[in-house]
Amino acid sequence: MTWMPDPSRPLRIGTRGSALALAQAHETRQRLMAVHGLTQDAFEIVVIKTTGDRITDRPLKEIGGKGLFTREIEDALSGGAIDIAVHSMKDMPTLQPEGLVIDCLLPREDVRDAFISERFGAIDELPQGTVVGSSSLRRRAQLAHRRPDLRLVEFRGNVQTRLTKLADGVADATFLAMAGLSRLGLPEIARGAISPDEMLPAVAQGAIGIERRKEDDGVARLLAPIDDGATSLRIQAERAYLARLDGSCQTPIAGLAELEGERLRLRGEILSPDGRLSFCGERHGPASDGEAMGRDLAEELLGRAGSDFLAAG
Ligand SMILES: NCc1[nH]cc(CCC(=O)O)c1CC(=O)O
């Protein structure tokens, strides 16, 4: 064992218990082992059940949106029951609780949404009136905007539950994040990956972030070598955009930053929940200006949408 914040005990990694969350915790452990020359017994994976895991029969927006999958884990981190927490950045509120910080991002996976259907190959092939299952505000609004003729039904649950619902004919198509499918080793479940030009992904989709206590310098040094600089730049821009928009968790919001050499391209979209209204915009600039670009893009979209737009959700 080379180096650990506290060599007398394993580093405790807090995570949700879903298959995807565990895969993400394992990836984090793997990267730390590789970069520090550690073995698996230097770590302990601590599974924490969150409100979002407990309530599975209602759309998330009815229970309270963001933070549902993170609160209990952040409490464990603040209270010292775990040393780091591994999160899907897509599910993270833009502000961390006092005393906690996320400054370590793993290399980003595929950012695109996956199209999933037994009968059809792509959105454009769906006949009029086809039933599509999704509980994502963003995906529902984007689909309704493009294809107001389709019929949307609520669809929650893990990958297996959703595939069973498709097989049972509850819906004829659905969406998942490509990143989740890849991390689960199930990329072949997707009939296709949807281009961000067609369906702009959620802010931070495909990114794993590692949260720690601010004052924990030992953990900061442990994590620093596994932070991916390019992913961090992109996520900072996207989350600055999201933070400036954050009127309500009921608003469909999409956003994606991409690096083109030293330059950052940031795209954003906000929609009305019924998909009738959509406002899109983009910024290009030096990668170091990502946060300012994010705030600026958000302000442009809010200005065009009108001040009531976010509240109306
Ligand atoms: N909201 C749930 C959630 N949070 C992160 C992912 C997928 C992995 C990722 O985007 O990093 C998913 C499921 C999905 O959208 O299919």
Image (spheres, rainbow, N blue to C red):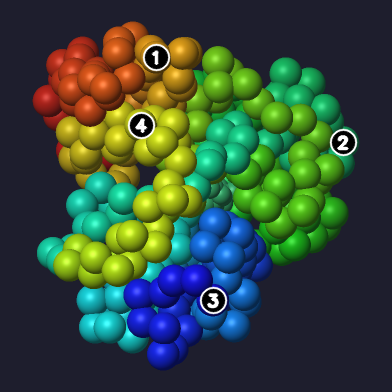
Q: CA distance from mark 4 to mark 1?
A: 11 Å
Q: Which residue is mark 4?
A: 233
Q: Image check: 169 left or right of 113?
A: right
Q: Amino acid at mark 3?
A: Met
Residue 37 visible in the current orientation: yes
Q: Nearer the viewer, mark 4 or mark 3?
A: 3
The secondary element bearing badge 3 is classed as: loop
Ligand 1 neighbours mark 4 (CB distance < 8 Å): no
Q: Image check: 232 left or right of 260?
A: left
Q: CA distance from mark 3 to mark 2?
A: 52 Å
Mark nearer the N terminus (1 vs 3):
3
Q: Which label number is shown at residue 1?
A: 3
Image spot of residue 38 (x, y percent): 57, 71
Image spot of residue 186 (x, y percent): 78, 51
Q: Which label number is shown at residue 262?
A: 1
Answer whether labels 4 and 3 touch (C-beta < 8 Å).
no
Image spot of residue 20 (x, y percent): 62, 61
Ligand 1 neighbours mark 3 (CB distance < 8 Å): no
Q: Nearer the viewer, residue 14 or 60?
A: 14
Q: Which label number is shown at residue 119?
A: 2
Q: Quadrant of the N terminus?
A: bottom right
Q: CA distance from mark 2 to mark 4?
A: 39 Å
Q: Residue furthest bottom?
A: 8
Q: Nearer the viewer, mark 1 or mark 2?
A: 1
Q: Amino acid at mark 1?
A: Glu
Q: CA distance from mark 1 to mark 3?
A: 37 Å
Q: Nearer the viewer, residue 186 or 209?
A: 209
Q: Image check: 106 left or right of 65?
A: right
Q: Image check: 125 left or right of 273?
A: right
Residue at screen point 68% across, 36% down: 114
Q: Nearer the viewer, mark 1 or mark 3?
A: 3
Q: CA distance from mark 1 to mark 2?
A: 42 Å
